[in-house]
Image (spheres, rainbow, N blue to C red):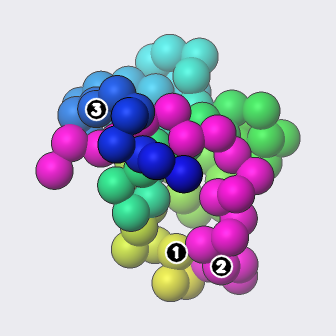
Amino acid sequence: MNTGLLPVYTTMQLALRNGQDRKEVWIAYQGVIYDVGHSRLWRTGKHYEHWAGQDLTLELADAPHTHKVFERFTAIGRLKS
């Protein structure tokens, strides 16, 4: 995946896509923003103790799955560093 062609969003723009403030449900992982809104597990903007609209890179270490879970989701942007 060539993420260099994806639009760049700030952490503030990501935070608004939390399933509450707007209908989009986005999360970031390793600088890439994913649309997780189609997942029944993220429908409310919360997945277990994780909230949408955030960078979840550090939290993946505690997850029962690997980074390969992101292959199920569409990359829609890059997180501005």
Q: Residue at x 38, y 34 (%)?
A: 5
Residue holding disc 2? 66
Dot 1 or dot 2: first in sequence order is 1
Q: Residue at x 54, y 51 (%)?
A: 1
Whether residue 29 is situated above or below residue 25 in the rendered picture: below
Whether residue 44 is situated above or below residue 52 in the rendered picture: above
Q: CA distance from mark 1 to mark 3?
A: 22 Å
Q: Nearer the viewer, residue 41 or 4?
A: 4
Q: Residue furthest right?
A: 40
Q: Identify the disc placed on residue 45.
A: none
Percent position of residue 57, x then y: 41, 67
Q: CA distance from mark 1 to mark 2?
A: 7 Å
Q: Identify the disc placed on residue 60.
A: 1
| Label 1 residue SS | helix
Can you see residue 44? no
Q: Residue at x 34, y 55 (%)?
A: 31
Whether residue 78 is situated above or below residue 50 in the rendered picture: above
Q: Are marks 1 and 2 in contact (CB under 8 Å)?
A: yes
Region of the chain picked out in magenta, as a range: 63-81
Q: Quadrant of residue 9?
A: top left
